[in-house]
Each structure stands twice: as structure tokens, then as C-alpha cells.
Image (cartoon, grey):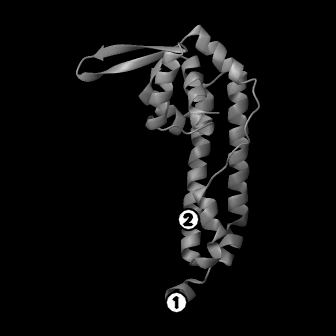
Amino acid sequence: MNVRNICLAILFEGETTGYEIRKLSTEGEYSYFVEASYGSIYPALARLEEDRLVTSRVEQTTGKPARKVYSITEAGRRAFIDSLFGKLDDDVYRSQFMMFARFAAELPADLVENRLAERIAAVEEHIKTLEELGKKRTSDPEQWVLGVGLHSLRAHLTYLTENKDKLVGMARPVAASAAE
């Protein structure tokens, strides 16, 4: 999924600002599909507006700067749905933690143990976030997608907790690391 389609997907559910699109694509439920930067969102919105797939209006607010609110058009709705008929790209999984774990044998055991604890806590928090989101989302497709995410995260958490001693055991002893 590209930035153009993530904008259309978010707007498909209701009008919003570029700021909110960014927030939803980095922290919200759409962060699981693609991460979009401000530098890619606003040009995509401008192009979508040129193509008449979205419209915008400036909304004045008291005590705050004006904000531009975007809405999807019927043509935009059709274009988004049509895009879902195309071939899907492979899923991409990138993890700084996995890079860290890949080189655990080069690192002191206490650092590896600390990073594992941090990762476990982060995954647990992520699970809580998705469970809370599940309470707010009621459609069957939304629940299904959240279910896949929760299943994946729970499996990840299980593997981390059941195998943390193996990874720490691969690391350098603390005394050996400090001596080098």
C-alpha cells in the first residue's frame, strides 16, 4: 500500500486533516499498513485533490491556526476500492530489535537481558493498545484484522518469553565484556 492509498483509506472513514492522517499512519491503526511522513502525505493529498479524488476546506478555529480538512469524493472512494483489486505487495517486516538480537553474541549479557525486558514490555503494551482498539471497532473486517495483529503479537511475546534465556546465553558474559 502506498501513501496515496493510505490517505484514501483514512478518508474513506471520514474527513480529517493531514496531521491526523500522519498520526493514524504512525501511531494509530493504519500504522500496520504503511508509515507515511508529512513529506509524503501532503504531496499525496495535493495530487489527490488535483485528480479530484479528495476535496479540502479551510476550517477556522478560535485561538488556533486554521486547518485544512480533507474529504474523499465518490471518485476517490471508487479509486480506493479499485486499488484493492490489484496485486498485493509482499508484507515487509523490519525490526531494530531483530538486528540487535542477530548480534547478541557480540554484546554483554546484561545488555541483551535489558533489551529483551524492554522488548517484552513494548510488545505487552502493543497488545493492550490493540485490545483497547478492538473495543472501539465493531465491524467484522476490523475485528478480523485486529485479530491477526493480536495473534502475531501474542506469538511474538510467547517466543520472546520462552526463549529469552537462549538469547542471553549467546551473549558475552558481563565480566568478559568489561575486560575487553
Mark sitting on residue 115: 2
Residue found at x 63% / y 36%: 33
Q: Is residue 69 left or right of residue 36?
A: left
Above or below, 17 against 168 in this view is above
Residue found at x 71% / y 19%: 82
Instruction: Name the kind of residue labelled 2 in the image.
Output: Arg
Work out whether residue 79 or residue 151 is closer to the camera in this orientation and state it.
79
- Can you tell which of label 2 and label 1 is closer to the viewer? 1
Relative image position of residue 75 (x, y in whole percent): 61, 10
**Which quadrant of the view contains residue 141?**
top right
Relative image position of residue 140 (x, y in whole percent): 72, 23
Q: Residues within 10 Å of mark 1 (few under 14, many from 20)?
A: few
Say which residue label 1 marks. Answer: 180
**Can residue 136 be seen?**
no
Instruction: Name the kind of residue labelled 1 in the image.
Output: Glu
Element carrying mark 2: helix
Number of numbered discs visible in the structure rendering: 2
**Which residue sits furthest left?**
63
Relative image position of residue 147 (x, y in whole percent): 72, 35
Work out whether residue 91 or residue 138 is closer to the camera in this orientation and state it.
91
- Tell me the distance, in whole angstroms, between the alpha carbons under discs 2 and 1: 21 Å
**Which quadrant of the view contains residue 116?**
bottom right
